[in-house]
Image: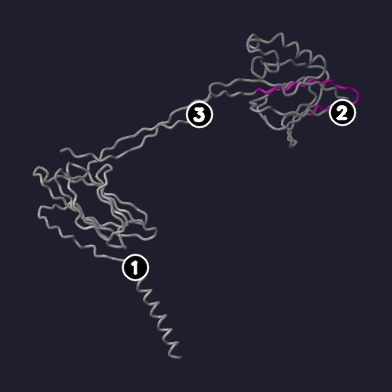
Amino acid sequence: MKGEEIKKVLFFFLTFLCFIIMCSKTSKIIYPANIMPEILNPKAKLVAEILFPISPGEKKSFYYQFAKGDTILFNAWTVKGNDISEISIIKWPDIPIVSAYGIRELTNKKIFVEKNSIYLFEFKNSSNWSSKTYKFTLHRVPTIEKYLNFSTDVEWITTYETTYVTKIESILVGIDTVWEDVVNTQRKISAGEFSIIEFGFPQNTAFWAYWIGVGEEAANGLKEMVSKLPEAASLLGISDPVVAFALGLVPQLFSLNKGKDINYEFYTSYFDVFLKGEKIITEYGKRETPKEGKCYLKLDNSYSILTPKLVTVRIVAIKLKYNYQIHQIKIPQIKTIRIPKIPKE
């Protein structure tokens, strides 16, 4: 290997080594934790000596109270990390006394206390990834005899702050019963034939009633029930016997024991038969299901060889109409607040 090449290799090696040394020094700076600042005043009383870790982006606060005439001696320094990102001393509630940024230490900072007060000592680590360790000491030098043994512990008062949030609510104020014709028809079904009636239920159907009758006599018998409805039906404005039956105002509908007959089947769109009858003259009833989707009624006269049939079909849906009123209500939100109690002089 030539001399020039050896020099280049050594140059790059030494440069890399210096880079590694510099990184190791700057990435983790550690200072002694047991260093105590020199406090020259013999009357100084130790209030606090605290060593604490602080995570990236974290803020830590310490509260102490001091007496009128005190002189506060404050020292803070970095034990682990390159600096104290931010340090603040605030006379509670919001009077800034000291603010410092990016310092390794703050030495023998003196603060004179004019009257009994509370002070907040606040530290912050602005690093996004590195934890740090800080330490601080706090002394007080009293000058008024009655405050020589003054307690620096802060007493906290718990208060409750109530605010109100407006919320819009729908309140149910009543339910109206409404009826609606679903099927009201007559079908003439020839011998050997059948007829299918397609129908659906209105929204909010709670239950429904049906009546099937074969022949003129059955149809006329149902009509004649109108004049025999009870007074309660009249008060509600009901003149339809099937509606009155659905609402329980009459116990039964017109029926015949003799006459022409028909077969029937109720089924859904999936051909699921849920009700059927064979060779009925009149038939009626109430149902709670189904009450949505398409349904079908098959009237079957296929078993009859010669006789056509006239079939009357009534289906009535009973709907529940919910009546709401919109109200603005105020909902209390209670927040617990801790407030330091200012010491009396």
Q: Quadrant of residue 128?
A: bottom left
Which color scheme did the rendering employ for the protein?
A: one colour
Q: Earlier in the sequence, mark 2 or mark 1?
A: 1
Q: Which residues are magenta?
A: 298-318
Residue that badge 1 annotates:
26
Relative to residue 93, is residue 198 drawn left or right? right
Residues tagged 2 and 1 counted as in contact (Cβ below 8 A): no
Q: Main secondary structure of the magenta part?
A: strand
- Element at badge 1? helix
Q: Residue at x 36, y 37 (%)?
A: 335
Residue 28, percent from left and from top: 33, 66
Residue type, label 3: Glu
Foreground residue among 60 and 170: 60
Residue that badge 3 annotates:
169
- Which residue occupies the extreme right position in the image? 306
Residue type, label 2: Glu
Q: Earlier in the sequence, mark 3 or mark 1?
A: 1
| Camera-nearest label, 3 or 2 | 3
- Element at badge 3? strand
Q: Residue at x 33, y 70 (%)?
A: 25
Relative to residue 215, is residue 323 drawn left or right? left
- Which residue occupies the extreme front position in the image? 4
- Which residue occupies the extreme bottom position in the image? 2
Distance, label 2 to label 1, CA atoms, is 100 Å
Distance, label 3 to label 2, CA atoms, is 56 Å
| Camera-nearest label, 3 or 1 | 1
Does 219 appear in magenta? Answer: no
Relative to residue 45, is residue 279 drawn left or right? right
Residue 344, percent from left and from top: 17, 38
Q: Quadrant of residue 179?
A: top right
Residue type, label 1: Thr
